[in-house]
Amino acid sequence: MDQALVGQLVDAARAVVAGRAISANGHGNVSVRVPGEDAMVYSAASSLSGLGPEGVVLVDLDGGLLEGSLPPIQAAVVAMHTFLYRHDPGIGAVLHTHAPAATAFAVARRPIDCWIEAMAMFGLADGVPVAGYGPRGSDEAVANIRDALRPGVPAVLLANHGVLSFHRTAELAVLVNGVVEEAAQAALASQAIGGPVAIEPELRAAALQRVMAFAAAGTKTA
Ligand SMILES: [Zn+2]
């Protein structure tokens, strides 16, 4: 197994746990595509808390186990990852969590709208759609994910289950999972004072353009 990819996966798991955009039991799974091969490295432990290199396996994109030992609870959701890599060659990493606030929206089967600026900045200007329920990792669940995907949108909520984030790199997938959770938290907190208000559509693009302009200008040094 490519130890650099294993390291990326382990670092991603650690970052998700450190960022607390995950349920208390740490349940989730993360994978990283093996460049140039129809394969991925994948977390075999049912919790991302304390995941080490020994908890990473190599799986081909047809779901066949190539290296390591894969327990049933994690084997059951392999198809959710392999589908995304086959669907979009631009996807380099997939992350699934039960981040609590985002999962509340998934349980309510309510999409998350562009309530915070970070959503506009990270590809979620049109919000996070909800994929209909199907038993975790089943053909039905995967078909529902496929139906919910929007071009360029790096996350979907899984009805009655959790969140799925996917991006070019594991770092970006972790970031998206965190942004979705932050938006969901803020929306739930705002329910006590009238509920969340989405950013005006024309201003979502402006928010992204502004951050890109600052990024292009680079770090200022006095
Ligand atoms: Zn799950």
Image (spheres, rainbow, N blue to C red):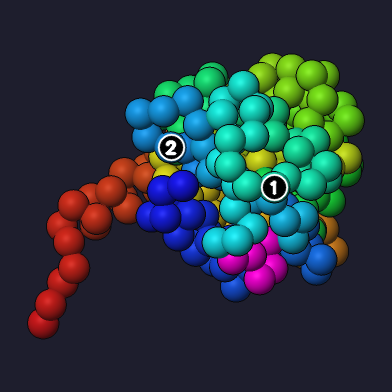
- In the picture of the structure, the residue carrying the numbered disc 1 is 69
- In the picture of the structure, the residue carrying the numbered disc 2 is 34
The image position of residue 36, as x and y in percent, is 35, 29
The image position of residue 120, as x and y in percent, is 48, 44
Placement of the C terminus among the 4 image quadrants: bottom left
Give the extent of the magenta segment. 48-52
The crowding category of the residue bearing disc 1, from other C-alpha atoms within 10 Å (few below 14, some 14 to 19, many at least 20), is: some
Q: Which mark is residue 143?
A: none
Does mark 2's beta carbon lie closer than 8 Å to ligand 1? no
Q: Is residue 157 left or right of residue 173?
A: right
The image position of residue 114, as x and y in percent, is 59, 44
Image height of 188 relative to 36, above or below: below
The crowding category of the residue bearing disc 2, from other C-alpha atoms within 10 Å (few below 14, some 14 to 19, many at least 20), is: some
Q: Is residue 202 left or right of residue 146?
A: left
Q: Main secondary structure of the magenta part?
A: loop
The image position of residue 181, as x and y in percent, is 67, 56
Q: Residue at x 41, y 28 (%)?
A: 37
Which element type, helix, strand or loop, lies under badge 1? loop
Residue kind at label 2, given as amino acid type: Val
